[in-house]
Image (spheres, coloured by chain):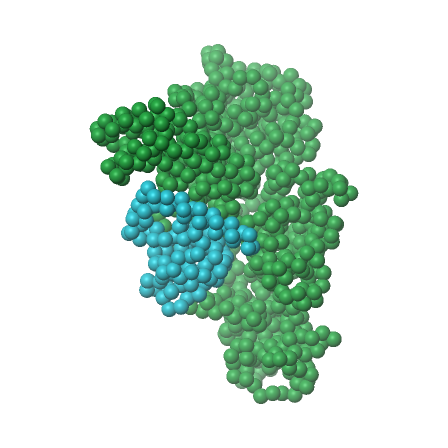
Chain colours: A green, B cyan
Amino acid sequence: MNPLLAQFLVEAREQVGATTDGLLELERNPGSADLLNGVFRSVHTLKGSSGLFEFPALTSVLHAGEDLLVALREHHLVLDPAMLDQVLAALDLVSGWLDHIDDTGLLPDDAAERGAPVIVALRGWLGGPVPGAPAAVVVEETRCALPIWLRDVPEPVLLEAVERSAATGAPLVAVSYRPEAQCFFKGDDPFALIRQVPDRLHLDVEEPEAWQPLAETDPFSCVIGFRALSAAPKGEVQHLLRYVDSQSEIVEFAAGQLVQFAGRPSGDPLARELGNALVMHHERGDRAALAAAAAALIETFGETGEGALLRWIAQLAPNAGVGAPLIGSLVTAFATGSCPVAPDLPDHPEAAVPASTEELPQAVVRLLGEQREMLLAVRNEAWIAGCIGSAAKVAAKGLRYARRNAEAEGMTRAGEEALAAGDASILVRAITAVLDPGPTKAVDVVRPKTATSEASPAATPAVSETVHERASTVLRVDQSRIDALMNLIGELVVAKNGLPFLARRAENVYGSREMAREIKEQHAVIDRIALELRNSIMQVRMLPVSTVFQRFPRLVRDLSRKLGKQVELVIEGEDTQADKTVIENLFEPILHLVRNSLDHGIEAERAAAGKPEAATLTLSASQDNDQVVIRVADDGRGIDPVVMRRKAVEKGLLDEEAAGRLSDSEAVNLIFAAGFSTAAAVTDVSGRGVGMDVVRTTIEKSGGRVEVASAIGVGTTVSLHLPLSMAVTRVMTLSVSGSQFGIPMDEIAETVRIPRSDVVAIKDKEAFLLRDRIIPLVHLDRALSLPPKEAAEEVAVLVVHVDKQPVGLAIEAFGEGMEVIVKPMEGPLADLPGYLGTALLGDGKVLLVLNLKEVVE
Amino acid sequence: MIRVDGGVIRLVGYCPVEDAEPLLEALQGGGAPSLDLGGCSSVHTAVLQLLLASSARVLIPPPDALLARLLPGRRDPDGAAAEERARSGDANGIRASEAERAAETLAHSSA
């Protein structure tokens, strides 16, 4: 990619981010002139830079946004949340385009069409006539083009759709839903969702153009889409798909429009001859005769376009609800051999496409003219400083782009002077000096119409300068290099662990105590260095949780507005750091929890419960020893343990007795049980498939755990406990039937020795009593199918927690605790469920680390 | 849930997203695997797309009418014939979609 473009993309994403943050802040604090000024500057700079490239749609959208912000700044308009929605939507569109540009170097093909309604919406706030041919858009809305896939819908379904619509008089809705590839990780089940489309007439799968060979298929990447046809009101369908509205397209249309899919006549002369009879029947309004005549001809034409038209006529004519114009258009099509035209929708001449691709020969000139105009237009003293800074920057960039570096520097200096003096006229003079005498006139003439395709060249020179300054202290390193270092350190730790073995050999085999002592001393030194080395590398990989948290203000705002609830988001401890992999895995689970809180936790009618109207949702992060704890807390209605118990019994997860034995907090934790979530979460986000158990699985996969605490009427807090780093695991070794195994330390509760006589048999299971609690006993040798050892007087028991339940593991002997790097099983071993992985010990042996959950079950 | 008996892959009950990986492995298992969906009530999208992507033969179609319509022989050479049948004038298609809705209503009310 062109380096200029690459730089633009980097800068543009930053500007979009800054604008989004600024807008959200502005919503909370609408009076702040500084914020508004900052937002305006970001959008202005972004628009200016975009003009450097041939992205007319992008520039026009930004221009519309900028104009709206100018109106706000000059107090022509008052900030309205709906207005912010639209500006944010415009930014979403822009960042989508930026991604597309990043991938292909071009705007998407439909950019102009998708941009037009956004521009109209933005300009709508400004009142007055909307520049840029809004008529085209309006026409499109009433006469919305039908999705092309309707052509592939089976004929009987189309016919049924027409009849249904005729009976109710309501329009039809076509839904096209293309889930994003990563949607499964968000807990989405698109198939389950689309199945719930109310009054569904048709559902089909949109397959990818070519299926990947199975061997290369990623089963967790969604590649299919869905298309559905429904007779329900558009609003209902939109409500169902409200969480995936960016991935779905819902088009409402009159059933009559479907006739265009009835069939394409081949122009058979026979049809024209026979068609006259049909036309006569139709003109006399004799539907029954028309249907009979059409039915009689079906055989003759068979599987041609004419045959299809006849089938439509035969089916629809007897139905009095179907309008005459519709039948008429079918009959006409048959008789004239032309394609059927949708009735009662006059043909619109193709609306003129707004001319927006202006060439940029005078880009710099126009740009400078515009800056000057802006400076002259500003009357408000408070704004002038911001405007001078912004204008000087843009003007200098423009000149550098035109390779007039000396003038560019002069411009920067003039800007500084103007800023110092608080007088824009210095800068205006500087700009005029560059422009004068000729071009300014031209600028003034062109400006009102072509402002949309304004160009601001050379975002890059200035950017690369700043990057240059930063480069001296900050290094950007490819993650794979850090990973390679991490692996090497892992090997170093393993090699270092070999030294104590060597010391023992020196003493026992070669009889040199002196040597052994020296080796041990060296080991201590290397040990310390290895530890520090590991910590430093881990520091490099550390990221603040703010990288995840910063996405939530926007999300919470959008969701709460959608749900019509007032929610205040409080973020705490965003400086807390954790390993990159841990941080990256956090977004989906937190998103799930936040959604749940907003949808189910927070009451719709809070005043009735005596709570403040605005609910509080707290996202907090803190460090607890070697764990990072993320909390998502709301002050909503809380989870009722009684309901949870009942649901669990209804769902068949527990029998009544077991449910009764659960403590309240255990009952509340049932929401994480697989197969429970959908039931508990039905209220109105039903059918989002998997639920809280996904949160639990994701977190457990990262080596963490999830807890929930809730008080009815007070609120719910979900805590995610995650390891700071996933690279090193503390394990305890133990031996069973002469073999060594490892168990992750954080699953171990305690080690005890109990006399054999204390073990009691309950049915075919064994258990023992520990501090008045019955704990089931699992013989690890039997569980692993190892040869049993003869019974000893005492049994060594490791009490571990599996799914929060204590379980005793009868083993032969305890080993030691150590830090190891667990490598997952590979190749044919990957299917063995009982093991988390292997670790290399200092003496070169391989330690199998057990997955207790699987072993115990 | 996924079960593999010989060359036959059985889908039983509801197949959640977790079943996608074992199913993919089973489909790649060599030979020409075939599918028994007789006991399959519903599937997650991830499982559905694997069923669509594979060329495995469906021995017993699923009882769920919608699922059955989306799956059968979509990719085998007779696919066109199936399409033909659906298009042919009689009201089979409509009856099928009615049956499908009825089946779903039943499923909902029993759940």
Say which residue appears at 67% left-offset and 27% top-offset.
A33
Q: A609 left or right of A841? A: right
Quadrant assignment, res A853: bottom right
Could you say which is closer to the camera, residue A411 or residue A837?
Answer: A837
Residue A640 seen from this side: yes
Residue at x 37% of width, y 25% of height:
A285
Is A713 situated left or right of A451 in this image? right
Q: Residue furthest right?
A: A610
Q: How many marks?
A: 0
Residue A855 in percent (x, y) is at 55, 72
Between A260 and A8, the one nearer to me in the picture: A260
The extreme left residue here reads A269
Location of the C terminus of chain B by quadrant is bottom right
User: At 41% from the left edge and 21% from the top edge, which residue is drawn?
Assistant: A346
Residue A423 visible somewhere in the drawing: no
Give above or below for B93 relative to A424: below
Is A596 rendered above or below residue A149? below
Which residue occupies 55% across, 82% down?
Answer: A737
Location of residue A54 in the rendering, given as x and y in whole percent from the top left corner: 42, 28
Q: Position of residue A753 (x, y in %)?
A: 68, 81
Picture coordinates of residue A520, whole percent (x, y): 60, 74
